[in-house]
Image: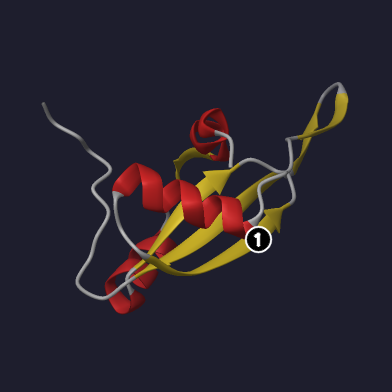
Amino acid sequence: MNPERVYTVLLEPHFSEKVAIQGEKSNQYGFKVARDATKAEIKEAVEKLFGVSVDKVTTVNVKGKQKRTFRGVTRKKDWKKAYVSVADGQELDYMVTD
């Protein structure tokens, strides 16, 4: 994979109640990823950026919500979410302190 592509695959960590429960149970983490990212690219990006070994990657395409306004119906953008399972005994550190 192109070295610049590593930094554009993962957009941001995704925090939700479900991700918190999955993290405690089965050592999984959630990310918002690029819509055209593949599972292999996501795995490689997480391994390079965080220095961990990834067991499994699961992806979900999320449809944007529709909102009614006084101007009519608008819709938020669709996005892609990835659940990344990390090997036992390893964890991701989102907050990097210098």
Quarter of the picture containing the C terminus is top left
Can residue 15 be seen here? The reply is no
Q: Residue at x 69, y 53 (%)?
A: 62
> In which quadrant of the rendered view does residue 27 lie?
bottom left
Within 10 Å of disc 1 (Cα), the crowding (few <14, some 14-19, many 20+) is few
Which residue is the site of mark 1?
A: 60
User: Viewed as shown, does residue 15 lie left or right of 65?
Assistant: left
The spot of residue 52 in percent (x, y) is 30, 58
Q: Residue at x 50, y 57 (%)?
A: 43
Front residue of 33 and 7:
7
**Secondary structure at numbered mark 1:** strand
Vertical side of 54 occupied by 63: above or below: above
Can residue 80 be seen here? The reply is yes
By what rule are the colours in the image chosen?
Answer: secondary structure
Vertical side of 76 occupied by 58: above or below: below
The spot of residue 29 in percent (x, y) is 39, 60
Vertical side of 20 occupied by 4: above or below: above
The spot of residue 79 in percent (x, y) is 68, 44
> In which quadrant of the rendered view does residue 21 lie?
bottom left
User: Viewed as shown, does residue 41 lie left or right of 13?
Assistant: right
* Amino acid on which disc 1 is placed: Val
